[in-house]
Image (cartoon, helix red, strand yellow):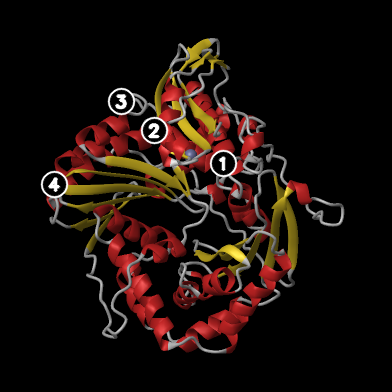
Amino acid sequence: MRCFLIAFISLAAFAANALLLPPASHAQTTIPRLDYRERTLANGLKIYSVEDHSSPTVAIQVWYHVGSKDDPPGRSGFAHLFEHLMFKSTKHMKSEMLDRLTEDVGGVNNAFTADDVTVYYETVPSNYLETLIWAEADRLSSLNVDDPNFKSERAVVQEEFRQSVLAPPYGKLDYLLTSQKSYTTHPYKRPTIGSIEDLDAATLADVRLFHDTFYRPSNATLIIAGDFDRTQLDAWVNKYFTPIQNPNTTLPRVTIKEPARTALRRYTEYGANVPLPAVEFTYLIPPKADADIYALRVAQAILAGGESSRLYRSLVYEQQLAQSAEGSADLREDTGLFVFKTTLASGKKPDDAERAMLAEISRMQNEPVTLAELNKAKNQLVTAQLRERETNNGKALALGDAVVIQGNANRVNTDINQVQSVTAADVQRVMRKYFTEANRVVINYLSETERTAQNDSDNPTPTNNRVPDTVGNPAQTPQQRKPIVINAGVLNGKAKDKPIPTYPDEAKKAGVYGTVAVKILVDEQGNVVAARAISGPPSLRKAAEEGALHTKFSPTLLAGKPVKVSGTISFNFKPK
Ligand SMILES: [Zn+2]
């Protein structure tokens, strides 16, 4: 199954992977300009293109300016549902045809949904560019928004919810609670993935209305980066996109503003499988296009970017209060969030972690950061951008973000100079301006077993947090674990045969045990036809895939007819 969901676009993730440039070099690194070309069709479609003939490949992206903030009330998860539906059949393509047009010629494709946008992207050998322009125009103009497609993808999304939100230990905190507790008013408070109840309540008419409203040429930006001939590109775009009519109806836009916070707020929340408590701080920060964002990004890198950051060194290495400490700037079209998250070390108290986190924040507010720290942070940010620009897809992503999220394509060429010009005083100023007590929300996230009357939050936990009892519980000791757990998930047909997979000798010898989750595709007869392990110890994955392939399900029926379904099956290995 395709798709990934953006809980938040983490600069920390970029920075942590970045190689450092030599620290002695104070000469400013420059990033080659992206010489983009821009045009708009009469139907409103915007096109940005960047030529680069260094490899015979081309990246195609379509940015729809619709994200989870645009989900209709009571219908959270619609933007994300559409990301899935866009891979189903159209007037001229069978379901999953996009895979055939990309993967079968050595290319790739995927999509993601965020709060502000839904983005579809492909990279293919450049002689397939016309095919992909045709395919993107086709799925914009003739997608089959019908009942079978809607119901099958809704089931897939609901399974994704169980797997990414309910099953992992901190999934509920990352995907639901952080937004719900951080925004009081703005629709950013709703989770991108939606809720099972809202999706269940959705009708085909709702889904069609959403598609007609937001999937239109004037709400889309086509980005092409790589090896193409510009005259040819223009001709293909004209040929396939110009005939698509833009509807006359107005495009609804979110105008609600999140009010500034006026006092510290605290929440204590619980999850079923939380092995160690987590403490999270969130602060409201301005939109991504705001001038303060450059200094906030540098502050993020110094304070919380990776294992050599101040926060990590202090909490994990020096005080040994936490097993992880991170912070990221979740930058959006409107009010964003700066999120610090710490997972405690065994036996430590949330209050101690909170004090230590506050001490590091105060230190950044009270004294300027050193020149070495400043240079290192900038190097991390520059390196991350250089790496992104190495691929055509990365160039297109940077351009799409500048155009759609920041509202100014040229920011793709000015960003790094702005980052380079941040001073220690700028960092100190934004730390004082945004990291105030009144602007802080604190979430303590604990195991259900710690729930006491006194600890209970005023705010009830969301209703969509049922954890299926078939999902393995990591809090159990190995001895308590049952040898095999089947999570039938979206598969309505129950597993008829549940083989116990062979425990690989080497893993047994090495004492490796744990749960392996396997994505599966089940055909109309209930046979598992594809299996791919997605988590769990590497040495156990092959055996789990083997076990999955030998599992047999009763056929899943949709309107009385057997259908192909996907889902996840888990195998729990324990040593004898
Ligand atoms: Zn998805």
Instruction: Give whichever of discs 3 and 2 has the lower sequence position.
Output: 2
The residues bearing labels 1 and 3 have C-alpha atoms spaced at a distance of 27 Å
Among numbered discs 2 and 4, the one appearing first in the sequence: 2
The quarter of the rendered structure image containing the C terminus is: top right
- The answer to whether the residue bearing label 4 lies less than 8 angstroms from the nearest atom of ligand 1 is no
Quarter of the image where one finds residue 188: bottom right
Decide: few, some or many residues near mark 2? Use Cα within 10 Å; few <14, some 14-19, many ≥20: many
Asked if residue 215 can be seen in this view, the reply is no
* Alpha carbon separation for disc pair 2 and 1: 17 Å
The circle drawn on residue 251 is none
Judged by depth in the image, the label closer to the viewer, 3 or 2, is 2
| Sequence-first disc among 3 and 4 | 3
First-in-chain label (1 vs 3): 1
Q: Quick one: SS at disc 2?
A: loop
Q: Position of residue 568 (x, y in %)?
A: 51, 30
Contact (Cβ within 8 Å) of mark 1 with mark 3 = no
Residue holding disc 4: 232
**Residue at label 2?**
87
Residue extending farthest right: 453
Q: Residue under label 1, please give it.
A: 77
Task: Say which residue appears at 32% left-offset and 41% top-offset.
Answer: 109
Q: Circle 3 is placed at which residue position?
A: 92
> What separation in Å lies between label 1 and label 4 (alpha carbons)?
38 Å
